[in-house]
Amino acid sequence: MRHQANPWITSNLWLLSAAMLPAIILVGALLFFTGWAITFSFTDLGLTGRKAVEWSWVGLENYERLFTRKGFLESLWTTVIFVFFSAIVGQSVLGFLLAATLRGTVSTTRSVVEVCIMLGWLLPDIVAAFLWSATTSQTGLINSLFVVPFGLKPINFINDFALPVVTLANIWKGTAWSYLLFVAALDSVPREIIEAAKIDGATRWQRAWLVVLPIIRPHIATNLLFITIWTFTYFPLIFAMTGGGPGRQTETLALFLYNQSFARGNLGFGSAISVAMLLIVGALSTVYLRMLREPK
Amino acid sequence: MERTTLSRPMAIALAFMAVIWVSPFAWLFSNAFDTAATGRLVWPQNFGIDNFTGAIGGDAGRMFLNSLLIAAGTATISVVVGAAAAYPLSRLRMPGKNALLWTLVLLRMLPSVGVLVPLYFAAQRSGLLNQFGVMLALSCLNLPFTLLLLKNFFDTVPIELEEAAYVDGASLWQIVTGIVLPMSRAGLAVVWFFSFTGAWNEFLLPLIFSRVEAAFPMSVGLYGAFGRMGAIDYGFLAAFSIIYAAPAVGVYFLLRRNMNTGFAGVGVKG
């Protein structure tokens, strides 16, 4: 903390305030847009046509539609499955296992695996989508390596197993983040504590479960917070691979929002979806932040 | 934890994972260098770089420039606006500063799809459904993160140096350009490249903001090309994908050490 006023700062207050102005405007715009989304959700604003100009207030009608019409609840369920299996089970658990396993290994093995999973993470979303569409297509890698050699007919994975395929693609793409975070977390566990537990006769399993995990709990919470929110609102990969289909099998909330707002042109209803998403994200953040703050 | 050698099943499992992770890339390269690529994993039949020359000329070349413009523009706006505000934020004691920082942390979590409709609406009304609109919108969404990161970097510049310069008669401008900015060069670079790759990879905003094909960046172009029905030109798309992915991947390995510092500083408050 600085207790003394610094003369080169205090004599230039106006200049500094002016320098902050653009940032304040942009951050203000962001807040304003959030407020706007809430306002729109009470109207029947359209993308094109008459309702784009002569919109009117419809009260809570959009929110009623969320729960009474088909679509929203189904999408929510798809999203929950997608987030649970790709982010929490896939990326987080796999990332942790990798971080724990690779700690003890020679550095070459470690860097090879690291570079492999980093490449997936660094790749632009659309390239990943293209790669996985091509890999799982009827003439693609998986069919020609694992299906056709066994005398089976090629399977159109993206059609028959759409949700598992996008889930897998997302695990492939996103594990690196969890991995890096857990590597940092495991490095922060003091060696002495583990040694002490070992001397006291704790098994490998007990050391992991009772010693290491409680220490890195804040990291776990941080990781879950970030990957849940990202995956919950993740759009490009699924959109480019399936567009939400076949039918609505992979239409997560982000895609539902996009389709309603920009394909169907219901900006009002789309805003209600985005408000619902913001509320869910907010609720999830609160839960994780509490997990982060709770005394050990 | 003790340094152990891997047990055999563990080693096999790791090798298997590495193969799974890498095989799509092997596929990508074998197709990109095969001028008669069919989308199968085979050693290139007609080895050649025609796919690459095809992927940098014509429409594809213009998309590359569009992506470059959007990414560089977003990164520059983010850094300039962010740095101008982060320095006062770091040095000034003002009322409500903590509230402001918390707002930024919360806004950082805000998903862009949550404000998608208002963003589109605002851009439409102000005639910004173009590349400049994309840059502005992305900078806007980036800014909370940029501000927090840059403030952290400026916090680490020792104020004694600034005091000394002031005593020697330096003006605010000289202090900032002569001491603060050079000393946080690494931080500025990290923020610039972070924003650059973020904008380079961005798909959703350009998708709804680009009204004409001439304005498409590579992400939208690639999506359009493989989403289209009919025969897929795997060779061309693979080469296009490699060119599109190269800057994002390259920047990371170039800045690896700095990135990890930024990552640890902002990601985790353990």
Image (tube, rainbow, N blue to C red):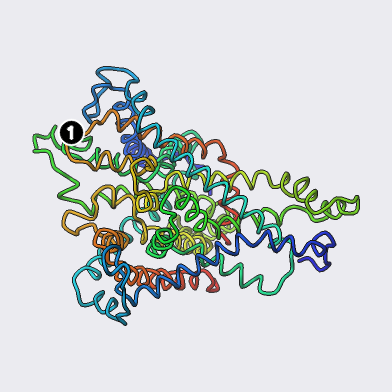
**Which residue is located at x 49 percent, y 50 percent?**
B135
> Which percent across, then down, holds residue A114?
45, 40
Q: Which residue is mark 1?
A: B231
Farthest residue in the bottom direction?
A59
> Which percent across, then down, holds residue A157?
18, 45
> Which percent across, then down, holds residue A200?
54, 61
Horizontal side of B106 relative to A155 (left or right) equals right
Q: Name the foreground residue: B234 vs B175.
A: B175
Q: Please state the total of marks drawn on the protein image.
A: 1
Marked residue chain, label 1: B
**Which residue is located at x 60 percent, y 64 percent?**
A24
Horizontal side of A101 relative to A90 (left or right) equals right
Q: At label 1, which amino acid type do we have?
A: Ala
Horizontal side of A63 relative to B252 (left or right) equals left
**Which residue is located at x 38 percent, y 38 percent?**
B11
Residue A137 visible (yes or no): yes
**Which residue is located at x 51 percent, y 58 percent?**
B140
> Which percent across, then down, holds residue B10?
37, 42
Q: Name the foreground residue: A70 vs B214.
A: B214
